[in-house]
Amino acid sequence: MHLFREQGQSLAVRPSGDCSVCLYTMGKFLAEVWYQVENNQIEVVRSSKSMICLEPSLAMVDLSDICH
């Protein structure tokens, strides 16, 4: 999580089961980090240049300023 907090910009956080799903912009791509709070572990990291595969998180945020 340190890399995402230091290098990225947090856009949204949403709950999903026992995880917090954190959406970050990392320059030219988006990263979705599935963080299991109870165990203090990252479960999954997904990245994409396409916004379609990260739609559940993107529905929470207006990206018009960073996606041209």
Image (cartoon, rainbow, N blue to C red):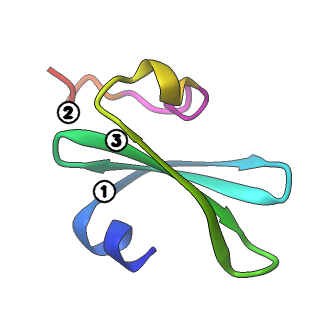
Disc 3 vs disc 2: which is toward the camera?
3
SS for callout 1: strand
Q: Is residue 36 left or right of residue 7?
A: right
Q: Quarter of the image containing the C terminus? A: top left
State the residue at coordinates (82%, 77%).
Answer: 38
Q: Earlier in the sequence, mark 2 or mark 1?
A: 1
Q: Position of residue 3 (x, y in %)?
A: 33, 73
The alpha-carbon separation of the residues under discs 2 and 1 comes to 11 Å
**Residue marked by disc 2:** 66
| Mark 2 secondary-structure assignment | loop
Q: Are marks 3 and 1 in contact (CB under 8 Å)?
A: no
**N-terminal of the two: label 3 or label 1?**
1
Magenta stretch: give its range.
56-62
Vertical arrangement, residue 38 with respect to residue 66, above or below = below
What residue is at 74 percent from the left and 49 percent from the top? Answer: 15
Would you place residue 32 above or below residue 42 in this image?
A: above
Q: Reading the chain from its start, which is encountered first: label 3 or label 2? A: 3
Q: Is residue 65 left or right of residue 58?
A: left
Mark 1, Cα crowd under 10 Å, few <14 / some 14-19 / many 20+, is some
Identify the residue position indicated by label 1 in the image: 9
Q: Tell which of 2 and 43 is nearer to you.
A: 43
Magenta run includes residue 57: yes
Task: Please state which amino acid type lies under the numbered disc 2.
Answer: Ile
Task: Name the residue carrying label 3.
Answer: 30
Q: Are marks 2 and 1 in contact (CB under 8 Å)?
A: no
Amino acid identity at mark 3: Leu
Gap in Å between the C-alphas at discs 3 and 2? 10 Å
Q: CA distance from mark 3 to mark 1?
A: 10 Å
Q: Secondary structure at mark 3?
A: strand
At label 1, which amino acid type do we have?
Gln
Disc 3 residue crowd, few under 14, some 14–19, many 20+, Cα 10 Å: many
